[in-house]
Amino acid sequence: MIRLALIIGFIGLGMQCHASELKLREAEHMASAAESKAKELGVVVSVAILDQSGLEKLFFRMDGASAGSIQIAKLKANTSASYRVSSRQLANANLNQPNRAYSFFPGVILLPGGLPIRLGDAFLGGVGVSGATGDQDEQIAQAALDALSH
């Protein structure tokens, strides 16, 4: 009986983990919304979407986006996926640190445009956008998040 309860418990845990996983279809929907917002703003960007483990789920670079925007978008997504806050919030927190410690953490970039991906209480990863101004990058990342909740 205990063995059966443990098996059922593990199956239940597996279903909970699966439910909070960012699906490829969801990432594609987010990417489409990000591209639409970028076009609306008249900018070209790169967008990186990482899962909750910090692994790349989807990446795209719009035609004309700079090569430099590729790595920056990935770093913004990694920053938000790793610390579960926006890259802007981490940059602001860094300003309040006397030693500016976050400036020296590997895989972190302190520029706006990275947002954590959440659906309800579940943490799903991070999205990073680069290629426009920091404010525009953040607006585009927010459009991607908004698409996930609809």
Image (spheres, helix red, strand yellow):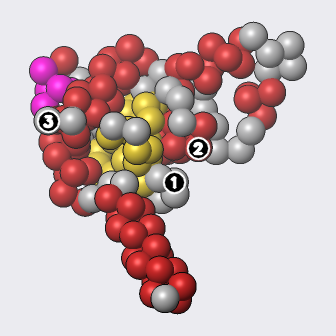
Q: Are marks 1 and 2 in contact (CB under 8 Å)?
A: yes
Q: Is residue 108 above or below residue 56?
A: above
Separation of residues labelled 3 and 2 (CA atoms): 25 Å
Q: Magenta segment, which residues?
A: 35-40
The residue mark sitting in front, 3 or 2, is: 3
Q: Which mark is residue 66?
A: none
Which amino acid lies under the numbered mark 2 shown in the image of this protein?
A: Ser
SS for callout 1: loop
Residue 144 is at least partly visible in this image: yes
**Residue behind mark 2:** 82
Q: Position of residue 110 (x, y in %)?
A: 60, 25
Residue that carries the numbered disc 3 in the rendered image: 150
Look at the image and say whether residue 10 sits in the magenta stretch. Answer: no
Asked whether 112 or 11 is in front, the reply is: 11
Q: Which element type, helix, strand or loop, lies under badge 2?
A: helix
Quadrant assignment for the C terminus: top left
- Whole-angstrom CA distance, mark 1 to mark 3, is 23 Å
Residue at left 33%, top 37%? 120
User: Callout 3, which amino acid?
Assistant: His
Q: Main secondary structure of the magenta part?
A: helix
Comes first in the chain, label 1 or label 2? 1
